[in-house]
Amino acid sequence: MIFREATIQDIQQMQVVRNAVKENTLSNPALVTDADVEKYITKRGKGWVCTIGGSVVGFAIADLVDHNIWALFVNPDVEARGIGKQLHELMMNWYFEQTNETVWLSTSPGTRAETFYRKQGWIETGVYGKGEIKFEMTEQRFKAMMRDL
């Protein structure tokens, strides 16, 4: 497994991963365009990928403009190998190197993603959009969680 910063050349494979997930699926894959991904990894924030054998199997994107986690997805074929956790750590370390602003994300209730974020120390703060759970993380909480690992 290789973890590295995402590039524009990775976008096509990132989209494959995004559309392979079984939870938090897009109702219409065209809702997240390649141009959207490019904007988030080059102008609004940064992204990371995990590759195995040269293929992207997971990715994460942090958005500094809206102070949120825009994406964290792992191909279901390689789940439970620590890929999501490592991408999360890379992304969060980078985010808090850039700003001390609280970061947020949302995910569907009752999903593995909800369980994952709770285990990473995210705090539920309400509802977002169409019934998604809104979570927040402060820099202090993230650093404390990393110390406890």
Image (spheres, rainbow, N blue to C red):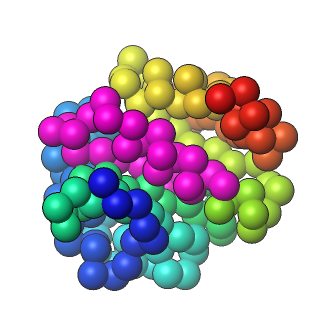
82 left or right of 138?
left
Task: Look at the picture and state if 64 lies above or below 106.
Answer: below
Q: Which residues are magenta?
A: 69-93
Residue beneath the point at 53% across and 70% down: 46
Residue placed most toward the observer, 146 or 24: 146
Residue 90, percent from left and from top: 56, 55
Residue beneath the point at 75% across and 34% down: 147
The verdict on residue 85 being magenta is yes
For residue 79, what is the image quadrant? Answer: top left
11 left or right of 84?
left
Residue placed most toward the observer, 81 or 84: 81
Q: Is residue 77 visible?
A: yes
Location of the C terminus (image quadrant): top right
For residue 24, what is the image quadrant? Answer: top left
Task: Look at the picture and state if 72 lies above or below 98.
Answer: above
Residue 86, percent from left and from top: 48, 46
Residue 29, percent from left and from top: 20, 57
